Image: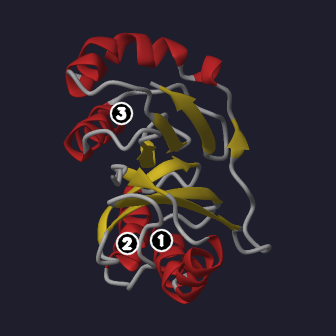
């Protein structure tokens, strides 16, 4: 008698090698993003699911503080076409990998904001935020850069449980159209949960 589990593990060394091989492409995505958002910086935590043949079935941002959806998508695409190790002990293997990206040292960093700085604006957007989330369970984490007039310069969303990408895109649209307080004479960066 044999038992086959749905979700198995991944060989850590081989999985790390795939993430390491993607570093140049991830860096390219970050460099391109830095041309749009000069003070772009932060960490990304990827989660991948690989099928029994070693093909990537799904990749998503488990966490991110980059705050630029185009950069985050580019990074996910950089992981997609790579050969992955086959799962161990299941039909699907799950693995995580993280990276940190720093802005050019000559660029002044944005002002650090807390959730309290955007709470009032988020309260006004709550109904639309909830509509985006719909029946997708779990929390989303958003990171935004807010310009000196309270406009959104860039926004990104991570899905800790790999929720619906459409919901994430909807959330980005709602957040990007919001009006926020001015951070003063220099843009601000804020990360918060939805």
Q: Residue at x 42, y 38 (%)?
A: 161
Image location (x, y in percent) of residue 44 = 58, 58
Residue at numbered disc 2: 74
Position of the C terminus, as image quadrant, is top left
How far apart marks 3 and 1 lie (CA) works out to 19 Å
Badge 2 vs badge 1, beta-carbon distance below 8 Å: yes
Characterize the local packing of mark 1: few (<14), some (14-19) or many (20 or more) Cα atoms within 10 angstroms. many
Q: Residue at x 45, y 53 (%)?
A: 61
The local secondary structure at tag 1 comes to: helix
- Compared across the picture, whether 175 is left or right of 114 comes to left
Comparing marks 2 and 1, which lies closer to the viewer?
2
Considering only vertical position in the picture, is 156 above or below 11?
A: above
Which of the marked residues, 2 or 3, is nearer the chain's N terminus? 2
How far apart marks 2 and 3 lie (CA) works out to 21 Å
- Compared across the picture, whether 174 is left or right of 122 comes to left
Considering only vertical position in the picture, is 169 above or below 43?
A: above
**Residue lying farthest to the front in this orientation:** 1
Characterize the local packing of mark 3: few (<14), some (14-19) or many (20 or more) Cα atoms within 10 angstroms. many
Image location (x, y in percent) of residue 178 = 35, 29
Question: In the drawing, what numbered circle is on residue 66?
Answer: none
Residue at numbered disc 1: 33
Comparing marks 2 and 3, which lies closer to the viewer?
2
Q: Residue at x 24, y 36 (%)?
A: 167
Q: How is the image coloured?
A: secondary structure
The local secondary structure at tag 2 comes to: helix
Characterize the local packing of mark 2: few (<14), some (14-19) or many (20 or more) Cα atoms within 10 angstroms. some
Question: In the drawing, what numbered circle is on residue 175?
Answer: 3
Considering only vertical position in the picture, is 175 above or below 134?
A: below
């Amino acid at each position: 008698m044999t038992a086959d589990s749905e979700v198995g593990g991944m060989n850590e060394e081989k999985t790390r090698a795939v993430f390491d091989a993607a570093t140049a492409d991830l860096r390219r995505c970050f460099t391109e993003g830095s041309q749009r958002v000069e003070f772009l910086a932060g960490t990304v935590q990827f989660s991948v699911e690989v099928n029994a043949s070693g093909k990537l079935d799904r990749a998503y941002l488990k966490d991110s503080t980059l705050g630029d959806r185009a950069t985050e998508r580019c990074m996910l695409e950089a992981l997609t076409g790579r050969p992955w190790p086959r799962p161990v002990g299941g039909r699907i293997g799950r693995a995580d990998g993280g990276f940190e990206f720093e802005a050019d040292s000559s660029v002044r960093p944005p002002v650090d904001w807390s959730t309290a700085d955007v709470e009032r604006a988020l309260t006004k957007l709550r109904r639309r935020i909830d509509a985006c989330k719909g029946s997708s369970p779990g929390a989303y984490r958003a990171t935004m850069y807010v310009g000196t007039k309270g406009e959104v310069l860039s926004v990104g969303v991570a899905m800790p449980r790999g929720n619906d990408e459409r919901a994430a895109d909807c959330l980005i649209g709602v957040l990007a159209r919001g009006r926020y307080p001015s951070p003063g004479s220099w843009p601000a960066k804020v990360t918060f949960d939805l």
